[in-house]
Amino acid sequence: MQGLPEEHACPECGLRYDGESEVYKHTNPKALFAGLLGFVGGTGGMFNLVRTYASAGPFWRVCIMLCWVIYFGAAVWLARYAYRLYRSGPLLAVLPDGLFIRLRRINGDWIKWENVSRAALNRARKGATLIFRDGRPVMDINGVFASTSDAQRFVSQVASRLG
């Protein structure tokens, strides 16, 4: 939210925020990095195939061409998957009107501040727990925070918003 005005609406989702708003979105880039590293290494192998079988008959040239098509298709699929994972991954936004929570690739839930009793730290799962006033079950928020310090910051933000 750097570079945007202090009080505004998000250009992507339309949610209203202020200077104290914060968005928590944790993605695990290790798997994507490993996949991209594999594709970079595989590209060298594919070029080696072309060099090795350049003078081979038409059958082998067609096989190499099919390998390139499959390889390129897999690279496009990985890029689309990474983008979908980024766009639909877990998200938690602390906003002036309440909390916006999206877990497990769904549209997300809007929770107003008057429905929240408090938030507690869940150290065992590197997350937090929301306790509601209206008798709803407790909500565990896991997989959104990059570290326990992020979860602690979230709990303190909820406490300051609730007054």
Image (cartoon, rainbow, N blue to C red):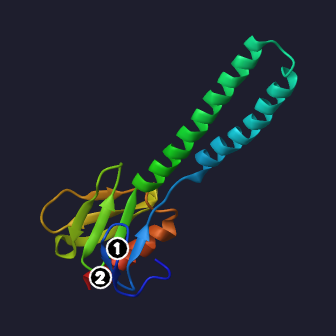
Asked if the residue under mark 1 is in contact with the one under mark 2, i.e. CB atoms within 8 Å, the reply is: yes
Percent position of residue 137, x then y: 19, 56
- Around disc 2, counting alpha carbons within 10 Å, would you say few (fewer than 14), some (14 to 19), or many (20 or more)? some
Q: In this view, does 59 lie to the left or right of 141?
A: right
Q: Distance between the residues labelled 2 and 1?
A: 9 Å
Q: What residue type is labelled 1?
A: Val
Mark drawn on residue 55: none
Camera-nearest residue between 95 and 157:
95
Percent position of residue 71, x then y: 64, 31
Q: In this view, does 11 lie to the left or right of 54?
A: left
Q: Above or below — where is 54 with respect to 144?
A: above
Per the image, label 2 sits on a secondary structure element best described as helix
Q: Tell me the quarter of the image containing the C terminus.
A: bottom left
Quadrant of the rendered structure where residue 108 is?
Answer: bottom left
Mark sitting earlier along the chain (2/1): 1
Q: What residue type is labelled 2?
A: Arg
Q: How many labels does the image show?
A: 2
Quadrant of the rendered structure where residue 143 is?
Answer: bottom left
The residue at the point 81 percent across, 12 percent down is: 57
Percent position of residue 150, x then y: 48, 69
Camera-nearest residue between 51 and 8:
51
Residue denoted by label 1? 94
The residue at the point 58 percent across, 52 percent down is: 29
Percent position of residue 28, x then y: 54, 52
Mark drawn on residue 161: 2
Q: In this view, does 96 lie to the left or right of 121?
A: left
Q: Above or below — where is 156 with respect to 55?
A: below
- Of the two numbered discs 2 and 1 in the rendering, the one whose residue sits closer to the viewer: 1
Q: Above or below — where is 85 with respect to 159?
A: above
